[in-house]
Amino acid sequence: MARLAVAEIGGSARERGRQHGRQLKALVRERDRRWRAEIEAFMAMPADRFIGRFLAETRFVAAIERHAPDLLEEVRGIAEGAELPEDALLAAQFMDEEWWYSVQLKQRREAAGTAHHCSGIASLTPGGGALLAQNMDLARWSDGLQALLLIRDIAPGLDAYVLTMAGMIGLCGVNSAGLAVTVNTLGDLNSASDGLPVAFVSRTLLARTGYDEAARFLGEIRHASGQNYILSDGRQLGDFECSTDHAVAFTPQDAAPGCLWHTNHALANRDLLPPSASEEAARFRRNTRQRLAALETRLKGRAAPFEQAVIRETLASQDDPDNPVSVTTENADRRRSGFFTFASVIWEIGPEIRAHVAPGAPSQFPYESFRLERSATRRAVAE
């Protein structure tokens, strides 16, 4: 059974990384071992050769140096703390980017058909609050690497809870200003080898204090990977489908005001890759559409705001057992899908901030709750 590792880190960017690497050292090193084995199985080449080629043939570092140089320092710190090569830790941050790059390297146009599977839901709540939630579906080999970071001073005077895979700077999260972000891969959108990678986009958003500033950042940068970002600060809520040079707002049809949901195919952004004709791509398209249909069936026409119980029930749903919203390891193995629900999160924005995290499919794992007080008081506790 997976369990959630929790690490509190702070100080300078380099020191944050060192603390991450030291506190989660066994998991970070295990992640490195599994990832290398996955690379060698998929690419049929030594992992070090792939990592070197991946870094040499992309220009992600230049984009990070321009937009988030402190996060590059944090990655170096993780490598130092975990006693792993810096290049490997850097390449490990580029999860979405590594996938489309490796597919292209094998000269198979299946990037739009085999991306990560995630389902997101959001709702504004009365009194200037919001609920942002998602099932984060990742590669089956990542089970057991679930971690939650409590980052002190992610920006001056700002703390954050960040869901991650041990060794990565983060996947999604919520900060003490009440700004939250969730992410869904959109593998059918165009990508760029000189864009800012998803993990660095998410972490940069979590260093912002308001919705307008965060949304503006999404529209200003060049994106390395097609990705859907749902943002809220409790006053505003938005969904942005981001491709290389476009951030297109999306609202579901027939959704109540202040309510959103999304899966893994673009619905508003038309900066699309040519569709793949492979059987694998067809399975992916069917899966993301069936999960979207499940969300719509449960949420369309429902009055705003969504209650947290409704969101939890929806994220735990398995209405179509071949395309469930909540993907247990057993279901993933039966279907040989390669992906499972790595974690489920609900970021609750209100007078206090709460992070609810299940270290696996929410139909199987209970949520653990953590409280993050607003920036002025700067104290976080597990409930």
Image (cartoon, rainbow, N blue to C red):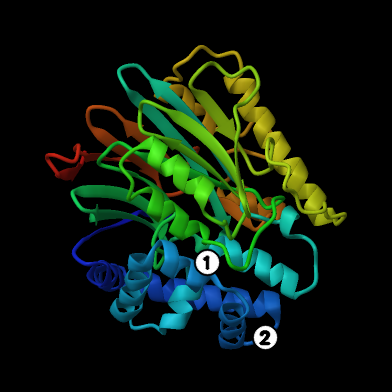
Residue 351 showing in the rendered view: yes
User: Can you identify the residue that label 2 sits on?
Assistant: 45
**Residue neighbourhood size for the residue with mark 2, other residues' Cα within 10 Å, grouped as few (<14), some (14–19), many (≥20):** few
Tell me the mark number nearer the camera, choosing from 2 and 1: 1
**Residue neighbourhood size for the residue with mark 1, other residues' Cα within 10 Å, grouped as few (<14), some (14–19), many (≥20):** many
User: Can you identify the residue that label 1 sits on?
Assistant: 94
Q: Residue at x 48, y 21 (%)?
A: 258
Determine whether the residue tagged by mark 2 lies in a helix, strand or loop. loop
171 and 30: which one is in front?
A: 171
Residue type at numbered disc 1: Phe
56 and 317: which one is in front?
A: 56
Determine whether the residue tagged by mark 1 lies in a helix, strand or loop. loop
Image quadrant occupied by the N terminus? bottom left
Distance between mark 2 and mark 1 Cα atoms: 19 Å
Position of 264 with respect to 343 (left or right) is right
Q: Residue at x 68, y 36 (%)?
A: 268
Residue type at numbered disc 2: Met
Position of 182 with respect to 286 (left or right) is left
